Image (cartoon, rainbow, N blue to C red):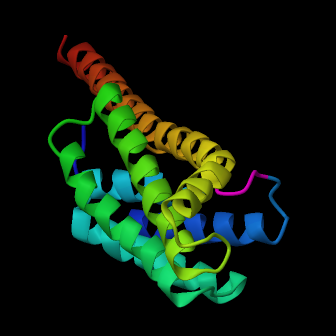
Amino acid sequence: MPTKLNKQQLVLLVLCMVAFRVLRDYGVLDFAPNVAPITAGILFIGSYASPAAALAVSLITMLVSDLFIGFYTAPVMIAVYGSFVLIALISRVLVKQRGAARVLTTTLWSSTLFFLITNAAVWAFSSMYPHTFDGLMTSYIMGVPFYKYTLLGDLGFAGAFFGGYALMTWLAGRLASYKATKLSAQEARYRV
């Protein structure tokens, strides 16, 4: 199975992720809040390109889509972007072993990390919750529905990215094998 994505594939992924995020936030795509391809894209690109490419792609995707959607509170935004930096580093785990269990576990950890960091940032840098332990717990409790959507979206997109790529690679291998077999059969016919 190929282990690297080329630049055209990376650009296509960025464009698709930006388009999804913008179209979802403008209501063109009807998805639940926090369902986005960013985390799964970071893990996928980190696995098949490099964590540095994953980091660059995620930050470019977020910046470009935030230009359309709008920016928000700077400290919370830094926490969101910082979460993606950590997820890009986590993607390194997938470079040597990309099995379904490893992808599932890494996606679960990444979604949970994003939830914990961003909800703590909302608690710390906004007036939505009191700056007490109870306020922090309330922030997490209120974030659970969004975590559910984040988790489902991340798992779905991870399945689509990793599974789709594995399927396309398998089909390409089968097609190459079929062509080689057919070519060998034609060559054998002419030798007789």
For residue 119, say whether it is visible. yes
Report the side of 46 relative to 129 (left or right): left
Q: What residue is rendered at 76% in x and 69% in y?
A: 25
**Was residue 33 drawn as part of the magenta stretch in this picture?**
yes
Instruction: Give whichever of 98, 82 is nearer the camera.
Output: 82
Q: Is residue 50 above or below residue 76?
A: above
Instruction: Give whichever of 3, 65 is nearer the camera.
Output: 65
Residue furthest to the top in view is 192
Q: In x, y percent, where is residue 98?
A: 26, 36
Report the side of 93 relative to 116 (left or right): left
Q: What residue is rendered at 54% in x and 54% in y?
A: 137
Instruction: Give whichever of 61, 71 is nearer the camera.
Output: 71
Quarter in which the N terminus is drawn: top left
Corner quadrant of residue 157 = top right
Q: What residue is rendered at 64% in x and 69% in y?
A: 129
Corner quadrant of residue 175 = top left
Residue furthest to the left in view is 96
- Report the magenta residues as a range: 31-35
Quarter in which the C terminus is drawn: top left
**Was residue 115 drawn as part of the magenta stretch in this picture?**
no
Q: What residue is rendered at 20% in x and 53% in y?
A: 92
Report the side of 62 relative to 110 (left or right): right
For residue 6, say whether it is visible. no
Q: Is residue 148 above or below residue 133?
A: above
Q: How many marks?
A: 0
Q: In x, y percent, where is residue 55?
A: 32, 71
Corner quadrant of residue 22 = bottom right
Q: Is residue 118 above or below residue 78?
A: above
Q: In x, y percent, where is residue 170?
A: 36, 29
Instruction: Give whichever of 185, 155 is nearer the camera.
Output: 155
- From the image, give the main secondary structure of the stretch colored magenta: loop
